[in-house]
Structures are given as C-alpha cells and as structure tokens.
Amino acid sequence: MIGLLEEMTEKALKRNIPLSVQLDLTYRCNERCVHCYLDHNDHGEMTTAEIKHLLKDMAEAGVFILTLSGGEIFLRKDFFEILEYARRELFFCVKLKTNAILIKEQEAARIRDIGVESIQISIYSHRPEIHDAITLVPGSLKRSIDAVRFLKSQGLRVILANVLMVQNAQDYRGVRALADELGVECTLDPTITPMMDGDRGVLSLNVDRGSLKDVFRDKGLVGDVDEFCAIAAPADESVLSSLPCSAGHTTCYVSPYGDVFPCVQFPLPTGNVRKERFIDIWRYSDRMNDVRSIRLKDLTTCTSCTHVSACTRCPGLAYMEGNMRGPSSLDCEKSFAKTGIESANMLAKKQARLNLVQIQGMPAASIAIA
Amino acid sequence: MSRLFLARNPRVAARVLDGEMMIMSGKDSTLFTLNKTATILWQSADGTTPLDEIVEKRICAEFEVGSDEALKDAETLARELAGHEILQISEQPIQQVAKIVETR
C-alpha cells in the first residue's frame, strides 16, 4: 500500500496532477474553539451546484484523495448530497474532518453506506472540563465520543485529532488512552497556527519549550527518541534540491468561497474556481508556479541552518510570517525542542536583538559625532 | 451457458492516473493498480453489459485474441477482482451505477 501510494505520488508529481485536495465546505461551526484560525461567518459559500461542478473538475484533473473539512461539515444541509456525489459519481477516496457532535446512529450508518476512507474527529482532552473549555460548548466531549462509538460500531476508520495547546498540554496521554479504549487511532499536532487573516494572537496558546521537549521525548509517541531527536545530517546537494513540502506540487486547498490556496495552512490566493477552472488555476497560476519553483536551496536563512535536512519547516507558516522562502519560527522551535540546538533563524534574531540593544545604548553625543 | 454481469463496487475509490487505473479497496483501503485488461473490465462494468459482450467488443479487438480464450481469462480476472471487492459479479444484470470520469 505505502509503496503504491508513493509510486502514485511520484507519478502525480511528474505529471503535475493535484492528487490530494482539501475542500472546506463551510467555515461555519457549532463549536468556538479558542485556538481556531477561521472566521466562522458565512461570506458566500459555494452552492451545491457550484461544489458539484468543482468536484467534477477536480476528478477530471486527477484528484484522487478528497478531504472534506470546515468549519463543521455537518452544518451544510446538502452535506450528504455532496458526499454521495463525490463517492458514487466520482469515486473519490474521501476523508472527513469533523467535530462529530451532529453524528448520531443514523448519520453513522449513512456514512458507512456511502463509504469513506476515514473520519478524523477533534478531541482536545479526555477530561470534559478541559475539552469543553476549549470548544466553548458544554457537553461537546461526550457528544463527540458518542459519535466515535456510533462510527466505530459501523466498522468505520476513526482517527482522534488532538491539537496541543497551553490548556491541554498535560492531557495528550489521556487522549491516547481514550483512543485505545475506543479502538481508534490518534494523532497529535503540537502547533497552533495563525488566523487565516494573519492575526497571530492565537499563537500565545502554543505550548512552551519545556512541554514541547517533553512531547518529543515521549517514547510512546515518537518511538525511538534518540532517532527522533537526532541532529540532522549535513544537507547535500540532493537534499538542497528537494521540495519543501507537497503544497502546490501534489496537494492544494479550496475554501468554501472557491479560493484556491497551495495548502490549508498557506493562505496565498492563487485563483477562484468561480472565475476560472480549477485545473487552469492549478496549472497556470503564477503564484502556484512560484510556490512550485521553490527548492530547499532557495530558502533564505534556512539553507545555512543545522536543521535544514530534517526540519519540518512549513512554507505556509513561513509565508504567514512574511516570506514563503524564509523560516517558520514555529518549526524552529520544534527543531530546538528536539535537539537543543538553536536554528539559524533563532541565532539571527538573537543577534538582531543584541544589535538593537547596542543602538539604544549609544549616547546622543556619539550619534551626533558619527 | 449462463452469462456474467459485472458492476463496479460503489465502495471503492478509483482514478486513472497517467494512463493507469488506481483502485482503493473500500474494505481495507488497500491500493491496487489494474492492468489493461482489468481496467477495461472495470470501465465496462455497467451492470448490464454481459461479460462475453465486453470481451468481444473491447478485449478481443484490443489484444487480437480468440474470444473463447479471452472470455475464460476475463472470467478468471473478474472473479479475482470480485474477490478483492473491486467488482461485483452476478448472473443477473446488476442495478447501478456511476459514470467514469476520465482525467483530462
């Protein structure tokens, strides 16, 4: 399976095929998660007909893996119509992302009948007082867990998605134990990302260095800790010629308003499917092709960094920081937490702060003489 | 002799990629690539066209093989694909089914 999928991805890369797309059906949501990066007001979602048209275009473009996400996908009254169309008419491999609080027995059975690859459900803690304080919806943990059981009883593949933040930093082991108890998989994401509009206020919810370090040294999570936290081998030419990530190469993201971006975490607008065909945006957008042209050796700062060959640098986070060819500080923090070695970006910032102190320290007379 | 009818299993995911048919099993997400003959069977499996007709019109014409031999091989292949839950087979027409979208 992995071999074939890699082969498929390689082919898609060579033929410039968008193998995998995340389509957010809505930004509306029935939870109000404190760390969420979205504006939940509806600013003109695509209609059912527009989405079906887009899905057909995507299938013709070669999209195979379709992730339907949001917002909360079950808030769309036409959700099952869209899902049925994607599966029965177009044979997409569909993955769902949801908080699942609207999934009862009936919905679970319907999802099973239609057939999806997996359903990813956001669970922030095994403790209701923590989870519900993050979603700001009392009773939400119970409803989500009930839904996991309904889906599981239908034989569906369920994955708990646990985003780590200040509020739940101590709870990831509890969530994993809960996943084991429910007989489902579990993922952990230690990164809170800025709002889509660039507001970085939510970044204060990111866990501190100590907590990140603990997570990366948890054998139950990472397996071989020494290997996971090893200092990267020096980057050779093949590493420097490699792609930063799959965004814009084999994957992209479409918003509920039809805007196409390289990735859900990379809010660089490249076109809108209400004005242009999806495949034309994918193939011919100058911005998409700009993203596509970037190799590791083109990165400012990072090329000279100790961590370059093993860094999880996200080009989208770098873009939101001001330069898609620049560093992503959140990923610098991860490399530091793993190895204890500061990244080139961290050292450069430290140097800049020192320089700033020197300037501020100069007496007025010296400036006048200079 | 009874005729066989083939239908695409609606639980799979499928896409033609670089001329090759990729199928993901709905049962366990196993990924398959189909060879040319299997791809023809998949694309022709509309639930109403009998296998012998598919073989005669699509396979014999494409591969220049005799119809008896081709039908025997195609039936073996169709049963194998059914074993992986990629196709459904029946001696009666099967109600279905979606069109195949070709990649541009």
Image: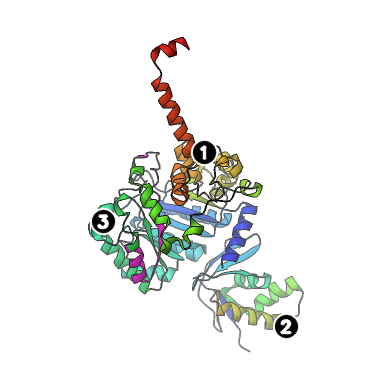
Q: Mark 2 points at which residue?
A: B69
Provide the secondary structure element on which disc 3 rests.
Answer: helix
Name the side, left or right, on which B60 lies relative to A227.
right
Chain letter behind tag 2? B
Mark 1 or 2: in front is 1
| SS under mark 1 | loop
Name the residue: 70% across, 77% down: B56
Label 3 sits on residue? A130
Q: Are marks 1 and 2 in contact (CB under 8 Å)?
A: no
- What stretch of residues is rendered in magenta? A174-200
Q: Mark 3 lies on which chain?
A: A
Amino acid carrying mark 3 in the image: Ile
**Identity of the residue furthest to the bottom in this view:** B1
What kind of residue is marked 1? Gly
Amino acid on which the number 2 mark rests in the picture: Glu
Question: Which residue is nearer to you in this view: A14 or A284?
Answer: A14
Q: Give the secondary structure at mark 2.
A: helix
Colour treatment of the image: rainbow
Residue on which the image places disc 1: A326
The CA span between labels 1 and 2 is 62 Å
